[in-house]
Amino acid sequence: MTTLVIRALDENSAHLFDTMPDPLGFREKHRNTRYRPDWQRIALRDGRTVARAAWWGGPEDPEPLLINWFDVAEGEEAAGAELLRTAAWRTDELELDLPAGWRTDPRLRAAADIRAAAARAAGYTPLVERFLYRWTPDRGLPKRPGRLVFATEPDDAVFLDLLRRIHSVTLDAHARRAIQQGGPDLAAQQELDLFHWFPSPRTWWQIARTPEGETVGIHIPARNSAGPCVGFIGVLPEQRGHGYAYDLLAECTHFLADRDAEFIAAATDQANFPMAAHFATVGYPVVRERINFRADGVVSGG
């Protein structure tokens, strides 16, 4: 086999990133994603691109947050792994966003398995599989049950306490991993940091209470760099079993729709059956499925 050449891109060579087939539809998935050319890399063999990866972060982030575009040609899993291993950044996560129902299509499954094998060879382990949703106005707005009262809260300490309580009993794989690493305090702080990372206004964050004043949970309507999204839905453990997550999601949807959202993106773990059911009821179709990989450990790049 001929020598592998790994190349970092820049503004003059960014077009080389598009010199591979796209069987998993990443180009369409990331049509609203802005990548920095110098955070993109390709691997070539005999002048042909056999692997490519794009690292992503927000406009103000000094380093990438994750890898969310990773393509590998058939038989080139080692090249894909080398492309990741030799990068200057070792992000904590890698995402594979796959077409909905990919496991039932042999062609899509083969393509996904190649990329997953390369990710594992580079030191990334599967963490969780998620449903990705996209609400659009043609789906109609969900009914508001009217059981809860929503209000803003300027004190971050109040949200941090609620997040700590919400994550004390959780199905969310990312929160469970954070709890293993540093307890509920770390899980809550990571969530709060994400809320602040969103460029949308802090005044959008809302707490839900019953008419009698009992706190039920929180919802975070948000915008990221790609557009409007459901930032977070969380119900306190003692308030679960009443379907309140539907109320929160319905309110979040109305909130963003009232601010002219042309779409609303959202996601939940596939194993979180109650939340997945609420997304379906509110009118959020599954548009893709994501495999989140976590880095086994931080290593220096080449």
Image (tube, rainbow, N blue to C red):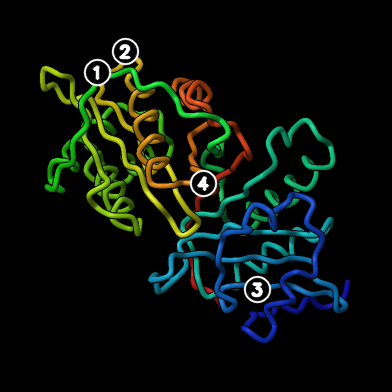
- The answer to whether the residue labelled 2 contacts the one labelled 3, judged by CB atoms less than 8 Å apart, is no
Query: In the rendered structure, are the residues bearing label 2 and label 1 in contact, judged by CB atoms less than 8 Å apart?
Result: yes
Q: Secondary structure at mark 3?
A: strand
Q: Using the numbered discs, state the Cα–Cα distance from disc 4 to disc 2 in whole angstroms.
A: 30 Å
State how far apart marks 2 and 3 are (Cα).
48 Å
* Disc on the earlier residue, 3 or 4: 3
Q: State the CA–CA distance, disc 3 to disc 1.
A: 47 Å
Callout in the foreground (2, 3):
2
Label 4: how many residues lie within 10 Å, few (<14), some (14-19) or many (20+)? few
Residue 67 place in picture, x, y as percent: 56, 60
Percent from the top left, x then y, of residue 205?
Answer: 25, 44
Q: Amino acid at mark 4?
A: Glu
Secondary structure of residue under mark 4: loop
**Front tag of 4 and 2:** 4
Residue 262, numbered label = 4
Tell me the kind of residue under disc 3. Answer: Arg
The residue that disc 3 covers is: 41
Instruction: Say which of marks 4 and 1 sits in front.
Output: 4
The residue that mark 1 highlights is 239
Q: Tell me which residue sits at (62%, 83%) in the image.
A: 10
Q: At 15% across and 42% down in the image, what residue appears?
A: 153
Does residue 50 appear to the left or right of 249 in the view shown? right
Residue under numbered circle 2: 242
Q: Nearer the viewer, residue 120 or 149?
A: 149
Of residues 1 and 197, the one drawn nearer to the viewer in this rendering = 197
Mark 2 surroundings within 10 Å by alpha-carbon count, few (fewer than 14), some (14 through 19), many (20 or more): few
Residue type at numbered disc 1: Gln
